[in-house]
Image (cartoon, grey):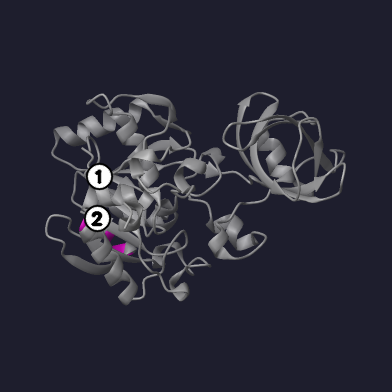
């Protein structure tokens, strides 16, 4: 058995949540006490009572971009599909994509408009992307032929990207609303920080009434979060970099929480990675930049005390991160119980609180 096999489990297909629950706050919540391994079955609405006054919720306020692009190769007419990752400098895009045959520098891709009502009707109905250079990770550096920011252009020509396990080709109107947190402010992600999908204004208000406050970080979810581990040894896995920011106001709020004896509750693994990136020197400070932090056992958590998260794919970096926090064996035991109790898994699924 390889090291990676230690992070495997079997999930029945019917437990994959391919549609969101009727209401955001309708999710179930498995509570795990990591010191004892004790498990409770609650709902996300119980969160204010499960946490303590003086605790601080830290949420990721990134916004999912309509980063999926579907078009064709100008020269051959062959279908092409790509995923926008970032704009390394104005006027250039980094995209990973797939098509039949081999792309070459100099050719162009044509993407038709998908959201005609989002801009002026005189705006062109096609976007052309010129391939400039193939990148070491397999992606391409491309140049769009239209002026405007990547947020503006993706808003007209892009689609909401959904994980493959949802098994639908195109995002629905429901997806466009529900695959986005209600506190999303800063566009930049290609996938949702899914633990935050459960939060409503009413749930946050109930937390505040109990003396549980909230603060925000930003991590633009990219390939680093969901690219599968393809090596047998965890130490050989290299995370794709993702941009994150821990603002000074959040650092100050965390310090105030520590001073009064409160705990730092990271909402989602992206918040965990942001906070731990900002405290890698041993002391938490403001941070803005790329992170390639891969949290794996053994790991000394410097800032995070509690994690609220969804259930993650087998052999994923996210499952490894949770194992570093909760203990691999106890975490997999909790997953086994969640499966036996028919919890819903993955992005639109139920949640887990690790205390």
* Quadrant including the N terminus: bottom left
Provide the secondary structure element on which disc 1 rests. loop
Image x and y of residue 278, in percent: 32, 29
Q: Nearer the viewer, residue 29 or 6?
A: 6
Image x and y of residue 302, in percent: 22, 35
Residue 334 vs 235, above or below: the answer is below
Residue 130 vs 5, above or below: the answer is above
In the displayed structure image, the side of residue 61 where residue 308 appears, left or right: left
Q: Which mark is residue 297?
A: 1
Determine if residue 67 is in view. yes
Image x and y of residue 340, in percent: 31, 76
Contact (Cβ within 8 Å) of mark 1 with mark 2? yes
Q: Which residues are drawn in magenta? A: 45-50
- Residue pictured at 33% horizontal, 62% vertical: 44
- Residue 62 inside the magenta-drawn segment: no
- Residue pictured at 38% horizontal, 56% vertical: 202
Q: Crowding at label 1, few (<14), some or many (≥20) Cα neighbours within 10 Å?
A: some
Residue for badge 2:
328
Q: Nearer the viewer, residue 205 or 163?
A: 163
């Amino acid at each position: 058995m390889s090291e990676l096999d230690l992070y495997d489990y079997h999930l029945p297909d019917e437990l994959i949540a391919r549609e969101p629950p009727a209401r955001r706050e309708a999710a179930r919540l498995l509570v795990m006490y990591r010191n004892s391994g004790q498990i409770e079955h609650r709902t996300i609405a119980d969160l204010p009572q499960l946490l303590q006054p003086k605790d601080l919720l830290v949420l990721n306020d990134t916004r999912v971009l309509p980063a999926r692009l579907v078009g064709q190769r100008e020269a051959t007419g062959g279908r092409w599909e790509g995923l926008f990752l970032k704009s390394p400098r104005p006027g250039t895009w980094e995209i990973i994509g797939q098509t039949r045959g081999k792309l070459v520098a100099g050719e162009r891709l044509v993407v038709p408009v998908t959201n005609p009502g989002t801009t002026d009707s005189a705006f062109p109905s096609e976007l052309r992307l010129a391939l400039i250079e193939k990148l070491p990770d397999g992606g391409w550096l491309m140049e769009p032929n239209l002026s405007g920011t990547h947020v503006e252009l993706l808003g007209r020509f892009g689609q909401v990207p959904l994980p493959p396990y949802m098994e639908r080709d195109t995002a629905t109107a429901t997806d466009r609303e529900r695959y986005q947190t209600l506190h999303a402010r800063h566009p930049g992600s290609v996938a949702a920080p899914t633990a935050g999908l459960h939060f409503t204004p009413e749930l946050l208000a109930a937390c505040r009434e109990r003396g549980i406050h909230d603060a925000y970080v930003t991590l633009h979810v990219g390939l680093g979060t969901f690219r599968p581990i393809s090596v047998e040894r965890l130490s050989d896995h290299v995370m794709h970099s993702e941009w994150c920011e821990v603002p000074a106001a959040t650092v100050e709020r965390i310090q105030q929480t520590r001073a009064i004896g409160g705990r730092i509750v990271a909402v989602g693994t992206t918040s965990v990675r942001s906070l731990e990136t900002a405290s890698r020197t041993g002391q938490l400070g403001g941070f803005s930049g790329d992170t390639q932090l891969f949290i794996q056992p053994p790991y000394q958590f410097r800032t995070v005390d509690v994690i609220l998260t969804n259930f993650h794919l087998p052999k994923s970096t996210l499952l490894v991160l949770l194992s570093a926090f909760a203990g691999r064996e106890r975490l997999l035991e909790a997953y086994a119980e969640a499966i036996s109790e028919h919890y819903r898994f993955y992005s639109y699924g139920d949640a887990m609180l690790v205390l």
